[in-house]
Image (cartoon, rainbow, N blue to C red):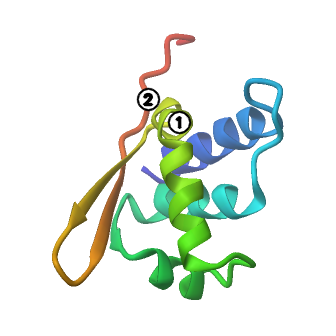
Amino acid sequence: KASSTASAISHLAKSLITTLGQPLDFNLSAFMRYVIKKKEVIFTPAEIVAELNLLITPSRFGRLLNSNIKRLEQEGIYVELNRTATSRNYKAKFIEPLSLEE
């Protein structure tokens, strides 16, 4: 299982160089690596910013996340927002994309 995670991270690294002609934001890249390693994470933007020592505000990270949902899904990372009266909890889950190259 560790080799499949390493393979996913390797694939991610290659595709992160540029996607759609735009370089990937460092903060988003760090988040993607974290989710791939953990497989499933429930968090708030403030918790992720603190956990990963990101150089971005929690509200800006939330906007970054929301504006890159399709890009994350292309890498097998699915994000849901569970909004309550008092918090915005996100759930991110990594589902390894099936390789068609085998």
Q: Foreground residue, 93 or 45?
A: 45
Q: Is residue 40 left or right of residue 96?
A: left
User: In this picture, is 41 found above or below 68?
Assistant: below
User: In the depicted view, which residue is nearer to us: 81 or 19?
Assistant: 81
* Residue drawn at point x = 51 percent, y = 77 percent: 48
Query: Which residue occupies the extreme front position in the image?
Result: 85
Q: Quadrant of residue 51?
A: bottom right
Mark 2–mark 1 distance (CA, rounded to whole Å): 7 Å
**Place of residue 68 in the rendered image (x, y in percent of width and height, measured from the top left):** 56, 43
Percent of width and height locating residue 98: 42, 23
SS under mark 2: loop
Vertical arrangement, residue 51 with respect to residue 33, above or below: below
Which residue is tagged 2? Answer: 97
Mark toward the start of the polypeptide (2 vs 1): 1
Q: Which residue lies most toward the bottom here?
A: 50
Left or right, 97 with reference to 80: right
Instruction: Classify 10 Å Cα crowding around label 1: few (below 14), some (14-19), many (20 and above).
Output: many
Amino acid type of the residue tagged 1 in the rendering: Glu
Residue 2, how many percent across, how many down?
A: 49, 54
Q: Is residue 102 left or right of residue 86?
A: right
Q: Residue sitting at 42 percent across and 37 percent down? A: 96
For the residues bearing labels 2 and 1, Cβ distance under 8 angstroms: yes
Dot 1 lies on which element? loop
Determine which residue is flagged by label 1. 75
